[in-house]
Structure formats: structure tokens, C-alpha cells
Image: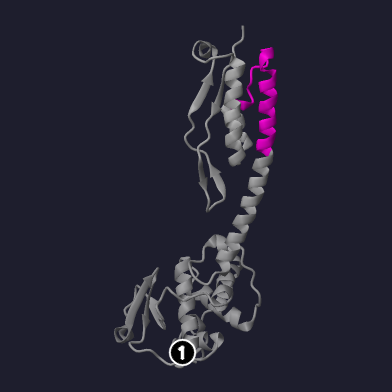
Amino acid sequence: MSYLRTTLPILGRHLLAGGALAAIVGLTPLVVSADTKATYPGTYHDALTDALDGEQQGLSAFAVTAGFARASGLGRIDTDNPENEEVRDRARAMLDALSTQDAQATSVSTGMQAEMTSQAAQTLGGPVSDVALEKVEVGSRSEEWYCLTEALYFEARGESRAGQRAVAEVILNRMDSARYPNTICGVVQQGKHRRNACQFSYNCDGRSNKIGNKPVFEELGKLAWIMMEGKQRTLTQDALFYHATFVKPRWAKKFVKTAKIGAHIFYRPPTTLSRN
């Protein structure tokens, strides 16, 4: 005689609200076998029916993957026993419901993730992640945008995202300061006609400013766009200057050190300056 043996999980009652995904924990197995006959009042059919009733109640509150349900044993009802035909049919119906719930949950969570990522890219505060930048669309490839993107490319493309943001902050802080030109291009090109005496060395070091890595340039262009659109400048504390960590310029002693990010150290004047 063939005996029915199947494992039905007790679903954990935990939900990760931030990610809109159900987490399954506390998987305590319920084993129904020939030995159950001596301890469970009623037939094996009754035992399975009660177990399925409990599972159905749990499934009504949580969307779980059909794959997990199949792996748990719902798809392995003993069909040799005619008594289990009703149980088998119910299990199949539950699997179909799980598949539908899984598809719906996946669609909802995917949509929410895309929306949250897009919002993260446009949010004025907080970090800019690589994932967020993937969702950014540059609204206007203006001359100002190009100047900021080019500066980030030559000054900070090897830096972390925070290091790139910090350099962008300095450029935009200078644009706002009455001490410097009131445009991005004016700031990054200041002194470019004086060999090795410009504000940003890539403009007067005698080397070509040809963009050799277009994908990186496009990525930095997205960051430049976010910064130009008004992302909060919270990393460098109003810094107007920076230098590489491997040098010690004399001018640095005159200013207040505000941050060290990656390969750069940032400074601001000791007093607040008027704005453009």
C-alpha cells in the first residue's frame, strides 16, 4: 500500500514593507505519514484537509512565489490513493492561485522599484547611486552642462561617486561666489590661456581634451545634470578649493579644511563671501 507523505510549510508572518516583497521565515514542516494515523483523530484525508485550510488562510494574506510552494511539496500529492483526489485538486488550485499572486506581486514590486529609483535620482538630498543614475535622462545638453561634465571627466572620473559630486560642488559653489565668474563655463575655463596657471589644470596643461571614454562621459553627464538641477551640496560644506592628497600647496594653510573625499582635500575661505 502506498502511503501519503508530503511536507506543507507554515508560512512566516513577516513582510518587508520597504521593498514590497514578502519574506518567508519560520518554515516549520508538517509531516503527514502513516504514523499520523495513531495520533491524529480522523483519516489522512482529514489531516491533509485541515493542513490545507490553514495554508489557504495564510496565502490569503501573503503573496509568495509559486516556485517555493512547489518545492515545499504541494505538487507531490499521492495520486495512488483515491481518497486524496479532492486534496490533490485543491493543491493544484492553490498552486494556480500562487502563480497569479506571484505575477501580480512581481509586477507591483517592479513598478515600485522603478519609481523609487527614478525618485532617488531626482531627489535633492541624499547620495546619488549608480542605480539611480541609470534612470536619469539629461534634459538639456547645453554648453553649461558640457562644461561641468567635461570638468568632472578630467578632474574626477577615477573618483567614487561622492568624490565626483564633491568636485561638482566646488565648481557650482564658485559660480555662486562673487569672487568667481557667474557661469559654469566661466569657472572651469578661468585662466585657461595661461599655461599651467589656470584654475583647473586640464585646461592649460598642454594636453588634448579629447574625450576617450564616451560611456563614462555620458554617466558623468547624468551626475552633472542632477547637480545643475539643484541637488543639495552637502559633502564639502561650501568649499571653493581642493587639491590632490599627494600634494601640499602653501595656499591650503590660508583656508579652512572641510572634507577629505577620495583623492582630494577640500577647503573654504575663513569668512563667508558674497554671492553672485
Amino acid type at circle 1 is Ser
Total marks shown come to 1
Return the residue found at the far front: 41
**Which color mode does the image show?**
one colour
Q: Residue at x 54, y 89 (%)?
A: 186
Residue 159 visible within the image? no
Residue 97 visible within the image? yes
Q: Is residue 241 above or below residue 34?
A: below
Q: Residue at x 44, y 70 (%)?
A: 163
* Of the pair 222 and 114, the residue shown nearer to us: 114
| Residue range highlighted in magenta | 73-99
* Of the pair 74 and 197, the residue shown nearer to us: 74
* Of the pair 136 and 163, the residue shown nearer to us: 136
Q: Residue at x 36, y 74 (%)?
A: 259
Residue holding disc 1: 177
Return the residue found at the far top: 1
The image shows residue 44 at horizontal and vertical percentages of: 59, 15
The image shows residue 179 at horizontal and vertical percentages of: 44, 93
Which picture quadrant has residue 77?
top right
Q: Is residue 61 above or below residue 205?
A: above
Which picture quadrant has residue 79?
top right
The image shows residue 240 at horizontal and vertical percentages of: 42, 83
Q: Residues within 10 Å of mark 1 (few under 14, many from 20)?
A: some
Quadrant, the N terminus: top right
Q: Is residue 213 left or right of residue 90?
A: left
Magenta-colored stretch includes residue 189: no
Magenta stretch mostly in which secondary structure? helix
The image shows residue 88 at horizontal and vertical percentages of: 67, 22
Q: Is residue 62 above or below residue 79?
A: below
- Secondary structure under tag 1 reads loop
